[in-house]
Amino acid sequence: MIATTTNTIEGKRITEYKGIVFGEVVSGINFIKDFAAGLSNFFGGRSGSYENELINAREEAIAEMKNKASNLGANAVVGVKIDYETLGQGNMIMVIASGTAVFIE
């Protein structure tokens, strides 16, 4: 399934709009990952544990969005947007993928 941030797909014609679809993932950061990220913050450098958590959450949110589009009979999602939020005391992240499910020829 094609998922794109643009509102059209080059060389394809949208023949039907199926509706807006979302994929939401809330992911917790455990104490060990939080501690390791704190060390990276103190000494400098990138936090691999946080980065991996964000990557996994984003991929899951996109997969969920595509699955919901497929359930509506769509074969593509256009206008995709990804949002990130921190919940609570910073130990939870929420990733939301949204877009318009469409059928293309």
Image (cartoon, helix red, strand yellow):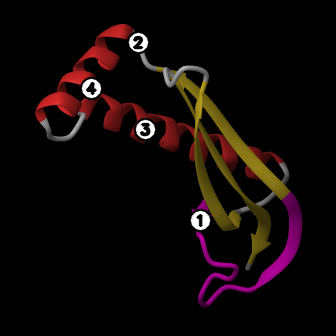
Which mark, residue 54? 3
Instruction: Find out whether residue 11 is within the magenta segment.
Output: yes
Reading the image, the residue beneath label 1 is: 2
Element at badge 4?
A: helix
Amino acid tagged 1:
Ile
Residue 24 location, x and y as percent?
A: 67, 37
Question: Which residue: 74% across, 47% down?
Answer: 22
Horizontal side, residue 79 vs residue 31: left or right: right
Query: Is 53 drawn above or below residue 2 in the view shown?
Result: above
Residue denoted by label 4: 37
For marks 1 and 4, give the CA distance: 34 Å
- Place of residue 8 in the rendered image (x, y in percent of width and height, measured from the top left): 68, 83
Q: Nearer the viewer, mark 1 or mark 3?
A: 3
Mark 4 belongs to which amino acid?
A: Ala
Which residue is the site of mark 2? Answer: 30
Decide if residue 58 is on the left or right side of residue 30: right
**Front in this rendered view, residue 46 or 26:** 46
Q: Residues within 10 Å of mark 2 (few under 14, many from 20)?
A: few
Crowdedness of circle 1 by 10 Å Cα count: few (<14), some, many (20+)?
A: few
- The C terminus is located in which quarter? bottom right
Answer with mark 3 or mark 4, whichever residue precedes in sequence.
4
Image spot of residue 16 (x, y percent)? 88, 73
